Image: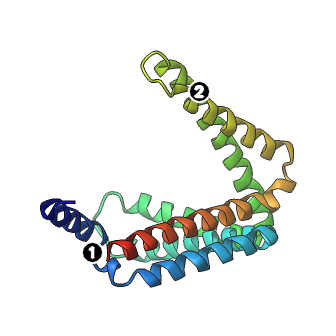
Amino acid sequence: MSTTNQAALTAIQGAIFGELKKNWGWLLALGIVSIVLGTLGFYMTFAFTLTSVLFFGILLLVGGTFQLAHAFTCKGWKGVLWHVLIALLYIAAGIDIIADPVRASAVLTLVLAGILIAVGVFRIIMALQIRTAVDGWYWSLFSGVVSIVLGGMIIAQWPESGLWVIGLFVAIELVFNGWSYIFVALAARKAA
């Protein structure tokens, strides 16, 4: 490789990786920890589901509380009533989720199944519309079918699926996140 090409590659890698080229080990460690946690999550899907749902409830409660407090600093604003009502809805939803995380996980799982089915239908429609213009259109079609099947499987086992689906999805996300961090860290090490 010529010196000009090598200099250009180094400049591009510097722009992409920045300080990560020196500190790639931390990202590698984060990736490994993420994979370990995700793998543990496959064996603890119920605990992961409840933890995720409780965390969501706490976020709603805290966010609603801050929004309600902020509403009292907005005297004269015509939207303050709506600001307060939204805050109260957040607070009520947070309290409801925290009070019964098992029921909340069942409801959230049913909503998730519905979203998967709707997304699958939309992907199939999109695939059929682009089939004459895009060579790989069948991947969108396949992706749509998979989404519909996943949503259907969740609904078929509902409400029991509410006890494990969210935790399973979090575990899968952690594992894939970990692998992506590992590959980025190794690329940064190679670029260093």
Hey, what amino acid is under mark 2?
Ile
Quarter of the image that includes the C terminus: bottom left
Q: Residue at x 79, y 46 (%)?
A: 154
Q: Residues within 10 Å of mark 2 (few under 14, many from 20)?
A: many
Q: Residue at x 51, y 71 (%)?
A: 182
**Along the viewing direction, whichever of 162 and 128 lies nearer the viewer:** 128
- The mark that comes first in sequence, 2 or 1, is 1
Q: Is residue 144 found left or right of 131 in the rendered image?
A: right
Q: Is residue 127 found left or right of 69 in the rendered image?
A: right
Q: Which residue is mark 2?
A: 124
Task: Name the spot of residue 171 as percent of width and height, x first.
Answer: 68, 66
Task: Name the spot of residue 156 as percent of width and height, x first.
Answer: 85, 42
Q: Secondary structure at mark 1?
A: helix
Q: Secondary structure at mark 2?
A: helix
Quarter of the image that includes the N terminus: bottom left
Q: Is residue 99 above or below residue 105?
A: below
Q: Which residue is mark 1?
A: 18
**Along the viewing direction, whichever of 172 and 116 lies nearer the viewer:** 172
Hey, what amino acid is under mark 1?
Gly
